[in-house]
Amino acid sequence: MDIVEFESGHAEAFRVLNEAWIAKHFAIEAKDREVIENPKAEILDKGGRIFMAVANGAPVGCVAMIPMPDGGFEVAKMTVAEGLRGSGLGRRLMQRCIEEGERLGAPRLYLETNSSLAPARALYLAMGFKDLQAQPTPYARCDTWMERPLG
């Protein structure tokens, strides 16, 4: 299993992987559509990064780093294919974000999630994220905000 930089050929897999997890737990919101249908314009062209987990040539997971005004990055659209959940792949994707954030000199990683996603929350806590007070968000499903200082 490799963690690779996003390429244009990954756009469909990025959309499909994200639609699958969001639709399983929540409604797909307008902001979701905007980002997952236009990853180049909404993430990469704004200075963000996307990493794809690839197994046997097929994308099986992804994560995005969206630049924030303070120089940090929002970790977003992180998911792993259903059959690989619990395999440690989510941890590898997050570690790649931490390493990339540090390499870029970002002060922090930030994320928004939902408290019902217990395995994801446990991963974030294990990787050094701490809870924040409520922040403005475009997502109706968001009820948990977290950050991890870098550097």
Image (tube, rainbow, N blue to C red):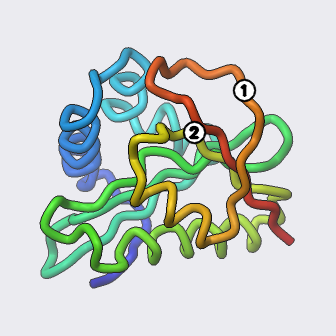
Q: Which mark is residue 135?
A: 1
Q: Position of residue 122 (x, y in %)?
A: 50, 63
Q: Are marks 1 and 2 in contact (CB under 8 Å)?
A: yes
The picture quadrant where one finds residue 56 is bottom left
Q: Amino acid at mark 1?
A: Gln
Q: Which mark is residue 57?
A: none
- State the residue at coordinates (44%, 57%): 120
* Mark 2 Cα shell of 10 Å, populated few (<14), some (14-19), many (≥20): many
Quarter holding the C terminus is bottom right
Determine the CA span between mark 1 and mark 2: 9 Å
- State the residue at coordinates (71%, 28%): 134
- State the residue at coordinates (29%, 73%): 86
Q: Secondary structure at mark 1?
A: loop
Q: Is residue 118 left or right of residue 13?
A: right
- State the residue at coordinates (78%, 56%): 108
The picture quadrant where one finds residue 1 is bottom left
Q: Position of residue 85 (x, y in %)?
A: 25, 67
Q: Position of residue 103 (x, y in %)?
A: 74, 73
Question: Where is mark 2, residue-wise?
Answer: 112
